[in-house]
Image (spheres, helix red, strand yellow):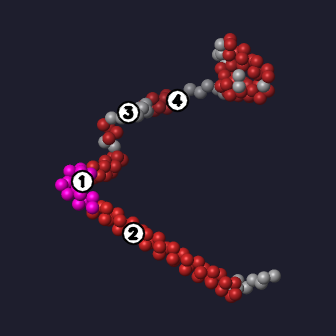
Amino acid sequence: MTCDKIEDLLAAYADAELGPDEWAAVERHLDACPDCAALLASLRTADASLSRFPEVEPPADLRETLYAIPARRRFRFGLDVLLRPSLQPAFAAAAVVLTLFTFYVFSPAKTQINKAINRQLHLGYSQVEKLYAKAGSLTDSLGGVADNVLVSLKKVNPLGKTDE
């Protein structure tokens, strides 16, 4: 057996809760593996230390308070989930999108809407292309200016440092 499997069985081994086959496999592994034997010794030391702690009985009012806490329910999908206020904006947006989609699908002027959308998309693409072209020319011109500024700063030497 591997150390990972033995580590999973060590607590049950220390409490004598293993079957004979598993008990023998753990024994063989512990004889051959000093790391797992050290882990078992640490586990037994921890058990011995914990057994020296006194048992404490909680006060009655604390127990009543703890028992009064409702048990956590598992998540169930039902109508109560749909009525949560945090989902209302999402449902409103979905309703608007569904309404617009319905108007589009059942509109008698569907081809004209398609043409208008296509036209607006192409106008947007051309504006983006123009912006990219302007940005490229701007970076080219700024590159030259940046070089000039660096040369000027070296000549002026505003910090008063010498090259030595």
Residue in view at x 71 percent, y 25 percent = 2
Q: CA distance from mark 1 to mark 3?
A: 36 Å
Asked whether residue 79 appears in the rendered view, the answer is yes
Asked which secondary structure carries label 3, the reply is: loop
Which residue in the protein does label 3 denote?
76
Q: Would you call the spot at circle 2 few (<14 residues within 10 Å), some (14-19), or many (20 or more)?
A: few
Structural distance between the alpha carbons of marks 2 and 3? 50 Å
Residue 51 seen in this snapshot: no
Q: Is residue 114 magenta?
A: yes
Please report whichever mark, 4 or 2, sits nearer to the chain's N-terminal start. 4
Asked if the magenta segment contains residue 27, the reply would be no
Query: Which amino acid, by three-letter code, is at mark 2?
Result: Ser
Main secondary structure of the magenta stretch? helix
Q: Which residues are magenta?
A: 101-115
Q: Label 3 crowding class (10 Å Cα cut-off): few <14, some 14-19, many 20+?
A: few
Which residue occupies the extreme right position in the image? 164
Q: Residues within 10 Å of mark 4 (few under 14, many from 20)?
A: few
**How many numbered marks are there?**
4
For image coordinates 69% across by 24% down, the residue present is 6
The C terminus - image quarter = bottom right
Q: Please state the horizontal and vertical placement of residue 130, each as a whole percent of the image.
A: 43, 72
Say which residue label 1 marks. Answer: 104
The numbered mark, 1 or 3, whose residue comes first in the sequence reads: 3
Query: Nearer the N terminus, badge 1 or badge 4?
Result: 4
Q: Which residue does the numbered mark 4 point to in the structure image? A: 59
Residue type (three-letter) at the residue carrying disc 4: Pro
Mark on residue 93? Answer: none
Kindly check if marks 1 and 3 are in contact, taking CB atoms under 8 A apart as contact.
no
Q: Residue at x 75, y 21 (%)?
A: 29
